[in-house]
Image (cartoon, grey):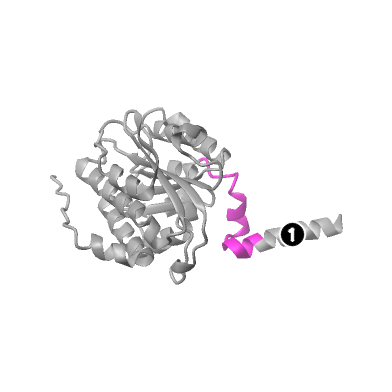
Amino acid sequence: MAKSGTGLALVYLHLYFLTGQTTHSFWRTHQLPSNPNDPYYQAFKKVPSAQTTANKFVKNFLHLSPSTVTKRQTYVEDVVAVLDGSGSIGHCEFEKGKTALSYLMGSAQRSNPTTDTQYAAVTFASSATVNFKFLKYAAAAANIMRIRYPGGWTNTQAGLNEALKLFLNSGSGVRPVGRRAVLLITDGASSSNHHWTIAKAAALKQNGVSIYVIAVGGAFMSGIDEMVKVASWPPQNHLFRVSDLNGLLTVIKLVVKQVAPGKYKIIMQQPYQPCHYHG
């Protein structure tokens, strides 16, 4: 028993140094605070610099080291982009989000020609729509720009549920092996059927899908606790913050600059149309 106890202690100690987590945060894997105003959640409201978020995205979503992007190992990956198209997003910002995803998808081969990446897309507002099933990166980058802005409530659980069905249905083009991930982009707590949101996220995780959340909004955004709970563990590696979708576009450009410099030169030559807000 002594040897067994020592072995477990060494495992926990190894996890401590490997992840950089304190013992307290390690046990939060299954014990997230019930109070949405808990300081644990409030810490995620801070919006880091675009470069900091880009570096984090490269490391945790693309699984690349910025200094060794050419050494990425070959693997298969199927990703569903789940994009919030609710009324609070607005048409112009929605277009910025689509453009950011298009740049991300389009850079897949340039960042590593041996990676076999497929993307599917789901948009949600009052209801959810599968915009396209799994396609190779180039076709996905083109198709994402054809999506129309829906407008409506924020039915996040419906978007997650459609993503789950894409992973469970072989007719969607999903592969039987490889990495599976959801990239959820949303600007606040769900306002429709919100009691299902965490459960639908849990169902995805139970089926081997990692959930990455891009939480859009300033320091006073609402619903950050829901986004933390939706994200895979640990949330500090799976949740990214931007002030708006124009900010996401900036982040993704910086990501592309690191992983696909040739693609970056091309997108920086494209015309830029800012969103105009009326107070």
Name the image quarter holding the N terminus: bottom right
In the rendered image, residue 20 lying in the magenta stretch gets the answer yes
Residue 49 visible = no
- Where is residue 216 drawn, in percent x and y? 33, 48
Residue sticking out furthest to the right: 1
Q: Residue at x 78, y 59 (%)?
A: 7
Q: Indicate the secondary structure of the residue bearing disc 1.
A: helix
- Where is residue 186 drawn, in percent x and y? 35, 43
In this rendering, position of residue 163 left or right of residue 138: right
In this rendering, position of residue 203 left or right of residue 43: right
Q: Considering only vertical position in the picture, is 153 above or below 217?
A: above
Q: Which residue is mark 1?
A: 9
Q: Which residues are magenta?
A: 15-34
Callout 1, which amino acid? Answer: Ala
Q: Considering only vertical position in the picture, is 155 above or below 60?
A: above
Q: Residue at x 26, y 44 (%)?
A: 145
In the rendered image, residue 275 lying in the magenta stretch gets the answer no
Residue 157 visible = yes
Q: Residue at x 40, y 53 (%)?
A: 240
Q: Residue at x 42, y 46 (%)?
A: 118
Q: Which of the 4 quarters of the picture holds residue 133? A: top left
26 or 163, which lies in front? 163
